Image (cartoon, grey):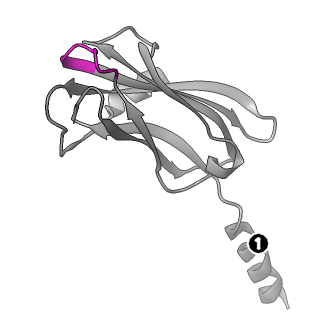
Amino acid sequence: MHLATTTVALLSTLSLASARIYGLQAPNQVVPGQPFTVTLLTQNYIQSVYDVAAAFGIAPGTGYPQSLGQVLSSEYLGPEKSNVVGNLNFTVIVDDNFEKGEATLSTSVMSLYGAVYGSTLSNWNVTVTVGDAQGTGLNPFDLGAVARSC
């Protein structure tokens, strides 16, 4: 009887997914006027997280700290895209007249953590090259930069 009770208790916790967004990934090269995919990376987490929204932007060069630059898109995340272990993909387009060269692609994600829904705004960025050919490689975020920005 004790084994059955313990098993039921353990199985009931399996359906309670807890995950959070921890970073950004994008192609290493993007072309103005052509759509490309940006990915919010997710991982298991110790408590529930309600992700409210994400905004994506791009700035020439290194941009400004904690800023998006030119806004590319904003997306409602809500309950269907919160606590999901599995990356979240979004399609964005850089303006046709955006200057070519090195740029900083950024995201800001507004989330509510835990039972009391404590609010956070997390920012991540990656360096991309804006040019004439779409990149085939992915450019993941810098773990060191994420640790400092969270």
Residue depicted at 76% across the width and 72% down the height: 12
Q: Quick one: 46 or 63, which is closer to the camera?
A: 63
Residue 101 painted magenta? yes
Q: Position of residue 67 (x, y in %)?
A: 45, 13
Using the image, determine if residue 100 lies above or below residue 77. above
Using the image, determine if residue 119 lies above or below residue 43. above
Residue 133 falls in image quadrant: top left
* Direction left: furthest residue: 132
**To which residue does mark 1 refer?**
12
Residue depicted at 41% across the width and 34% down the height: 92
| 57 horizontally vs 26: left or right | right
Q: How many marks?
A: 1
- Give the residues drawn in magenta, as a range: 95-103
**What amino acid type is highlighted by mark number 1?**
Ser
| 14 horizontally vs 102: left or right | right
| 115 horizontally vs 67: left or right | right
Residue depicted at 72% across the width and 74% down the height: 10
